Amino acid sequence: MALRATIYKAEIHVADNDRAYYGSHAVTVARHPSETDERLMVRLLAYALLVDGDEGLAFTRGLSETDEPDLWRLDLTGAIRQWIEVGLPDERRILRACGRAEEVIVFAYGRGAEVWWAGVRDRVARAGNLTVYALPAEATRALAELAERGMSLNVNVTDRSAWVSTDHGEATVELRMLTGEV
């Protein structure tokens, strides 16, 4: 018998001072059986960092569907405006996404993020619509500690730093942009 996805419900309250966006969003996310709490929480953080008044940003089937990113923003015609990946995708996946979407954003996390970027940087350099952020491993592990099946996340963003808090703890995640670095 196959394992089933676990459903998580989150109320995300965003105060993004960098973009002057303030809002609350109720989201339901399916956690694939092979997905960790850390990856789930990075997906929720990515949502909080990119959500705006436009209703086009949505979670996809993620790990269950290899032809879809973790999140995407579609326009009214179904064209992909933003393709958002979480983790360390290979360069073929990134370049294919850059060909399908107006903008591709990768939130790289984990101990191997710097090594991964060193390996793919030159091969994806020609993609003008790619933005890659590195999230510190210790910060994403602290973020994982906040995961609950039903949670209320307060996300305050200032100067590319996200402070995430719940009733049970907090984590600060510094976003370091890797694209454009020499």
Image (cartoon, rainbow, N blue to C red):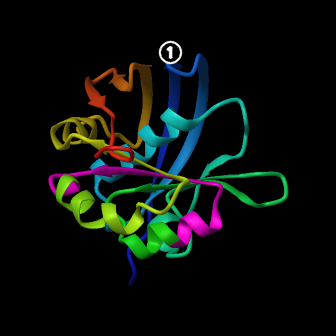
Quarter of the image where one finds residue 27: top right
- Left or right, 102 with reference to 175: right
The crowd level at tag 1 (other Cα within 10 Å; few <14, some 14-19, many 20+) is: few
Q: Is residue 19 above or below residue 48?
A: above
Amino acid carrying label 1: it is Asn
Magenta region includes residue 88: no
Q: Which residue is drawn at 40% across and 80% down?
A: 2
Furthest-front residue in view? 182
Q: Residue at x 32, y 51 (%)?
A: 108
Q: Is residue 111 above or below residue 35?
A: above
Q: Tell me the magenta residue range.
A: 96-113
Q: Which residue is drawn at 64% across and 31% down?
A: 52
To which residue does mark 1 refer?
17
Q: Position of residue 55 (x, y in %)?
A: 73, 40
- Residue nearer the viewer, 37 or 91: 91
- Left or right, 92 with reference to 166: right
Q: Is the N terminus in the top left, top right, bottom left or bottom right quadrant?
A: bottom left
Q: Where is residue 107 in the image (x, y as percent from the top left)?
A: 38, 48
